Image (cartoon, helix red, strand yellow):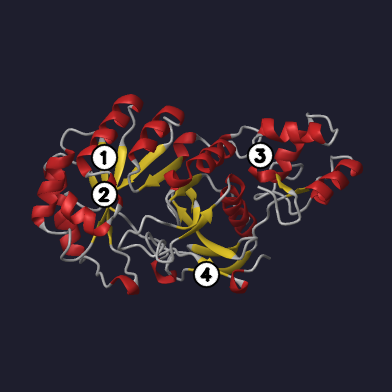
């Protein structure tokens, strides 16, 4: 993607594409490795989040740095706002995009390391009833560079490396599959962040055709399915995508996925009081998932004022979990981080800055 001044965002480029770009400006391709190190935090100093400008790439000739300044961009995202949870230290970032839109990302600390939840689109067109992300619809897809820069910006802000990535922010990742694929490859690039595929999780509301593509291209990446209901009647009310891909079709694709990859699927199930959290719902869900290589992640609803929906009490959530466990379906209740800053699951939103004008 080019900026408004017609410059190439180098963070959108894979290594082979960066080499092609270097050839186009009459520079040797071996410089690509050096540039990758600087962009992604390797460099001479090994700084988290990489450098801000080409002038900081001190092992590149001055003439090359000048060429890069004239023709390319480092694709930096600068936080407009950073909120820090007083409860658990989670950080929510509001990033302004070049076109006047704004997206949110969340940095979380766990015992196993640092994790970031990134957005894949500015807005979302899936229309899930309980989620804030799609309330203003879809503005546009994010590029691979805009996705990876969310991680790098958080590293620069915290001074800490991030070793786990979840694509669960605003947007439906499989609705932006090409850029999602580029993002995953950039995360895994040995000369860049060199992140293990097993440390990446992608969540989808269930775009069935893309599940097969994902199994073929990224069998080691973790897949999470936003299910949120035990049947089509309830799911159709909560998630319009269910009308295009009913649960029988979705679960058949999930079984094919586990057979092909031998990887366990995580089913995300948001518990909404009086809607999908009863004992009968738990029994029905257990029957649906019987025999599948899966895990159910129960998420007591993180309330969004506009939806009019309410969260399930802890006692009811635990009872639901026990129903699944007794019927052989592994289940846990997610520990939510960042709830006090509206940074938990389903609470991230699309923003607009400067009246939507380009920056």
Q: Earlier in the sequence, mark 1 or mark 4?
A: 4
Element marked by disc 3: loop
Q: Is residue 326 left or right of residue 188?
A: left
Q: Nearer the viewer, residue 287 or 49?
A: 287
Q: Position of residue 134 (x, y in %)?
A: 40, 61
Question: Do we see residue 112 in this rendering?
Answer: no
Instruction: Give the residue at mark 2.
Output: 242
Secondary structure beneath label 1: helix
Observer-side mark, 3 or 4, equals 3
Q: Quick one: label 3, few (<14), some, or many (20+) residues within 10 Å?
A: many
Mark number for residue 83?
Answer: 4
Precedes in sequence: disc 3 or disc 2: 3
Q: Tag 4's secondary structure? A: strand
For this rendering, which residue is in front, 71 or 137?
A: 137
Task: Judge left or right: residue 139 versus residue 193.
Answer: left
Give percent across and percent down for residue 159: 63, 55
Q: Residue at 82% across / 50% down in the picture?
A: 69
The residue located at (29%, 54%) in the rendering is 240
Closer to the observer: label 4 or label 2?
2
Cα–Cα gap, marks 2 and 1:
9 Å
- Image x and y of residue 132, in percent: 39, 65
Task: Name the side, left or right, on which 221 lies relative to 255.
Answer: right
- In contact (CB < 8 Å): disc 2 and disc 1: yes
Which circle marks residue 250 in the picture? 1
Give how far apart the Cα atoms at labels 3 and 4 are.
Answer: 31 Å
In whole angstroms, how far apart are the C-alphas of marks 1 and 4? Answer: 37 Å
């Amino acid at each position: 993607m080019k900026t408004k001044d017609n410059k190439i965002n180098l963070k959108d480029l894979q290594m082979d594409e960066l080499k092609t770009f270097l050839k186009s400006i009459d520079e040797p391709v071996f410089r690509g490795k050096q540039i990758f190190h600087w962009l992604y935090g390797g460099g001479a100093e090994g700084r988290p989040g990489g450098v801000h400008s080409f002038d900081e790439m001190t092992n590149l000739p001055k003439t090359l740095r000048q060429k890069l300044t004239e023709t390319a961009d480092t694709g930096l995202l600068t936080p407009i706002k950073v909120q820090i949870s007083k409860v658990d230290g989670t950080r929510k970032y509001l990033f302004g995009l070049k076109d006047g839109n704004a997206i949110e990302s969340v940095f979380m600390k766990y015992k196993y390391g640092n994790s970031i939840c990134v957005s894949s689109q500015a807005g979302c067109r899936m229309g899930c009833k309980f989620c804030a992300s799609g309330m203003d619809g879809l503005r546009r897809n994010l590029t691979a560079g805009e996705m990876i820069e969310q991680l790098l910006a958080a590293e620069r802000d915290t001074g800490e490396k991030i070793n786990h990535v979840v694509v669960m922010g605003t947007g439906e990742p499989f609705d932006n599959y090409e850029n999602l694929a580029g993002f995953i490859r950039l995360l895994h690039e040995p000369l860049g962040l060199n992140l293990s595929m097993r440390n990446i999780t992608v969540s989808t509301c269930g775009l069935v055709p893309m599940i097969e593509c994902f199994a073929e291209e990224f069998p080691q990446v973790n897949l999470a399915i936003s299910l949120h209901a035990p049947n089509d009647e309830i799911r159709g009310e909560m998630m319009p995508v269910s009308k295009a891909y009913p649960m029988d079709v979705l679960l058949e694709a999930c079984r094919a996925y586990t057979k092909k990859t031998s990887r366990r699927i995580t089913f995300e199930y948001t518990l909404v009081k009086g809607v999908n959290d009863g004992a009968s719902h738990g029994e029905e869900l257990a029957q649906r998932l019987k025999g599948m290589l899966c895990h159910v992640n129960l998420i007591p609803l993180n309330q969004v004022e506009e939806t009019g929906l309410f969260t399930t009490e802890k006692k009811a959530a635990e009872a639901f979990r026990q129903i699944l466990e007794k019927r052989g379906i592994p289940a846990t209740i997610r520990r939510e981080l960042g709830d006090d800053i509206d940074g938990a699951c389903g609470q991230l939103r699309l923003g607009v800055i400067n009246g939507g004008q380009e920056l």
